[in-house]
């Protein structure tokens, strides 16, 4: 039996585009229109049913919830902010507060307003100023209700999908452009961090807690030869810690937001940069259980990563960890084993202050559509009926007691 601290944050995470539905001013909405793509459509209709969804979160003893704000709703045209949509998000946040659920608000979770993308998206130098204008508007309006902010969700995932592999909008495949986007993200985060803190001071509201959420993978050398070990170290440096190290140097993280899912078995075929950065074992050496998208389940990786994060000397919140599966026993096993590893890391001195499962409910998994089922709550997409899964109840017991039997 292990016990977590009394004030631990327990809950789940969502992102606006994946659950709300009808985000017609977003660049993803436009991208989906192209033939052959699964459309997000009404998604989970969370925009309408958020009260009901938070009732379920409450019944599962969650005391925290991570949500994102859809920029394209707030600023559907450049410089024109929608008071109606702002009111909606205030209502959403108050709905959490009235249930004693601590909101954690993400400002950018993969999607952009169409006008922003049309004028060069994150490649454009002006992207930083545009993002800051949106942050300024939101912070002034929401500061009273929000303590935890995430500026940008998984910049490394966005950049690798949208600017290196080119499988997400705007479908670019260019290392050069990826670097430009990365630099703009870094600058956007650093400036947003300072701006949000400044606004809280001006408004005389106690200091907020701000970070990014970083997707970190366990890069494990398949055969531990020199090439594979070197490749794993490089990937750690570039993919996992590059962004964090840079923003840490500027002291612009109040905590580390960690999104952890899986392991990558590193098998570099050549010494070339492409191989070192990308090659993976295709022979199923070291087999482990997998989620329905074929990702390795590797809870001990979370322990190893948490120990590596110790160098920042900051509290860590697990802002995403989850599994897509139709096998709900496996879901509970996944949560259980990851929580065990978090606790082990805490015993080694890592200060973990919260765990948010991805996701509260099944949702629109980007280019993979509605197939993958990550939710604690099942969604029937023909009726939008919500059904709480057994794994959610088991996790709910841990949220209530802080005890993992
Ligand atoms: C993202 C989520 C996504 C999840 C599962 C994370 O990379 O933040 O939006 O649904 O992983 O793939």
Image (cartoon, rainbow, N blue to C red):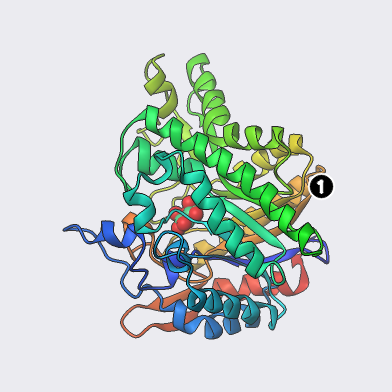
- Residue at the extreme left: 35
Nearest the camera: 34 or 86? 86
Q: Which residue is at a point 41% across and 75% down the rendered structure image?
A: 44
* Image location (x, y in percent) of residue 243: 58, 36
> Image height check: is 273 above or below 210?
above
| Residue visible at 70% across and 32% down in the picture | 249
Determine if residue 262 is in view.
Answer: no
Say how many tags the image has.
1
Query: Which residue appears at 35% of the width and 65% of the height?
Result: 25
Q: Is residue 91 visible?
A: yes
Residue 48, quarter of the rendered image: bottom left
Q: Position of residue 82 (x, y in %)?
A: 47, 72
Residue density around tag 1, few if under 14, some if 14–19, many if 20 or more, within 10 Å = few
Residue denoted by label 1: 347
* Residue nearest the viewer, comparing 45 with 134: 134
Residue at the farthest front position: 79
59 sits to left or right of 110 = right
Quadrant location of the C terminus in the rendered image: bottom right
Question: Could you say where residue 50 lies in the image, as x and y percent from the top left?
Answer: 52, 80
Displayed quadrant of residue 321 = bottom right
Horizontal side of 404 relative to 79 (left or right) equals right
Kindly state the secondary structure of the residue where label 1 is placed.
Answer: helix
x and y, in percent, of residue 75 in the image: 45, 64
């Amino acid at each position: 039996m292990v016990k977590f601290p009394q004030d631990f944050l327990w809950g789940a995470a969502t992102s606006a585009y994946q659950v709300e539905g009808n985000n017609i001013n977003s660049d993803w909405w436009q991208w989906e229109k192209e033939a052959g793509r699964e459309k997000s459509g009404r998604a989970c209709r969370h925009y309408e049913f958020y009260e009901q969804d938070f009732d379920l979160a409450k019944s599962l003893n969650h005391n925290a919830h991570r949500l994102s704000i859809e920029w394209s709703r707030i600023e559907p045209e450049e410089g024109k902010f929608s008071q109606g949509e702002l009111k909606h998000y205030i209502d959403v946040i108050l709905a959490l507060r009235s249930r004693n659920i601590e909101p954690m608000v993400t400002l950018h979770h993969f999607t952009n307003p169409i006008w922003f993308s049309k004028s060069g998206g994150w490649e454009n130098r002006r992207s930083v100023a545009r993002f800051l204008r949106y942050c300024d508007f939101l912070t002034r309006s929401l500061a009273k209700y929000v303590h935890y902010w995430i500026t940008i969700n998984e910049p490394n995932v966005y950049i690798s999908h949208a600017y290196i592999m080119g499988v997400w909008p705007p479908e670019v495949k260019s290392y050069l452009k990826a670097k430009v986007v990365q630099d703009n993200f870094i600058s956007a985060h650093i400036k947003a961090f300072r701006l949000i803190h400044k606004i809280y001071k001006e408004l005389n509201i106690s200091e907020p807690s701000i970070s990014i959420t970083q997707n970190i993978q366990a890069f494990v050398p398949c055969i531990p030869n020199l090439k594979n070990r070197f490749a794993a170290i490089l990937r750690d440096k570039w993919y996992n810690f590059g962004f964090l190290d840079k923003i840490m140097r500027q002291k612009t993280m109040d905590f580390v937001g960690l999104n952890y899912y899986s392991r990558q078995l590193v098998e570099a075929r050549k010494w070339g940069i492409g191989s070192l950065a990308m090659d993976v074992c295709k022979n199923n050496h070291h087999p482990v259980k997998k989620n329905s998208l074929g990702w390795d389940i590797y809870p001990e990786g979370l322990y190893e990563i948490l120990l590596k994060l110790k160098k920042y000397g900051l509290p860590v919140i697990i802002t995403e960890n989850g599994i897509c599966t139709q096998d709900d026993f496996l879901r509970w096993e996944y949560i259980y084993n990851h929580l065990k590893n978090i606790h082990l890391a805490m015993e080694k001195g890592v200060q973990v202050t919260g765990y948010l499962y991805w996701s509260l409910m099944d949702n629109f998994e980007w280019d993979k559509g509605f197939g993958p089922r990550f939710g604690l709550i099942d969604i029937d997409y023909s009726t939008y009926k919500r059904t709480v899964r057994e794994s959610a109840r088991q996790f709910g017991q841990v949220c209530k007691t802080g005890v993992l039997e």
